[in-house]
Image (tube, helix red, strand yellow):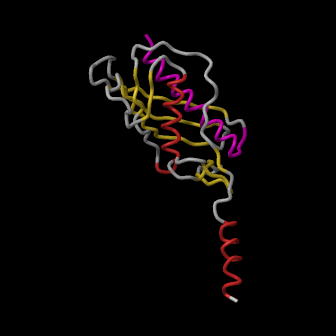
Amino acid sequence: MFRMLLPLVLLLVSACAGTEPRYLIDPPEVKTVSRLAVSSIEVREVSLPTYAEGSEILMEGEDGALMPIDNAAWADDPVRAVTLSLADQMGRASTATVAAEPWPLEEGADVSVHVRVTAMVARADGTFDLTGQYALSSFDKVVRERVARFDISIPLPANTPSGIALATSQSVTALSDQILTALRR
């Protein structure tokens, strides 16, 4: 009898595990390309707050508590997804060769971008906030090293996982634009 029930139990367990929809952080199409003062950029691993590192998609409640949205998860590890999305967006929107760490080329990058996010949250008021700071470091002093703050607020298209994913993508694009503006010729 146990042999007959085992396949049924395994089927039920696999059907219940990990079936929630998964959402991408996928920046929109690039409209303009910026000419930069550097030819290569390394994007270091983005530092996210602990609550934003998990696979759950969170939404702020009226009481300020961050709660996971039922049956919704990120398609990739958020740290990895934000880092790669930022590098990809910067590469598509500029004349520079851009890659996420570890730097894949023999010769080092002209500049490294370090991003530390202090808030990445879908707010109860219908906005998505991305705040923190980024640093531009240049071993060979190709550009002036500096630290700058960012405070990005994007309207949520909807209080849904897909709306939060879209606003996250738009905020990463806005951050990319700010960093590229700082590196323009």
Q: Position of residue 138 (x, y in %)?
A: 31, 23
Q: Name, please, the residue furthest toward the left.
A: 140
Question: Front-most of 42 and 158?
Answer: 42
Question: Front-most of 59 and 138?
Answer: 138
Q: Position of residue 37 (x, y in %)?
A: 40, 13
> Could you tell me which quadrant the C terminus lies in?
top left
Query: What residue is at 56 percent from the left and 52 percent from the top?
Result: 55
**Magenta residues, as a range?**
158-185
Q: Would residue 172 be counted in the magenta stretch?
A: yes
Query: What residue is at 40 percent from the left and 29 percent from the top?
Result: 42
Q: How many marks?
A: 0
> Could you tell me which quadrant the N terminus lies in?
bottom right
**In the depicted structure, whether residue 125 falls above or below residue 12:** above
Q: Quadrant of residue 183?
A: top left
Q: Position of residue 89 (x, y in %)?
A: 54, 28
Q: Quadrant of residue 168?
A: top right
Q: Name, please, the residue furthest toward the front.
A: 3
Query: What residue is at 62 percent from the left and 18 percent from the top?
Result: 31
Q: Main secondary structure of the magenta part?
A: helix
**In the depicted structure, whether residue 16 falls above or below residue 145:** below
| Left or right of 127 on screen, residue 42 | left
| Left or right of 2 on screen, residue 88 | left
Q: Name, please, the residue furthest toward the bottom.
A: 1
Q: Position of residue 68 (x, y in %)?
A: 62, 54
Q: Would residue 166 be counted in the magenta stretch?
A: yes
**In the depicted structure, whether residue 16 falls above or below residue 25:** below
| Left or right of 23 on screen, residue 111 | left
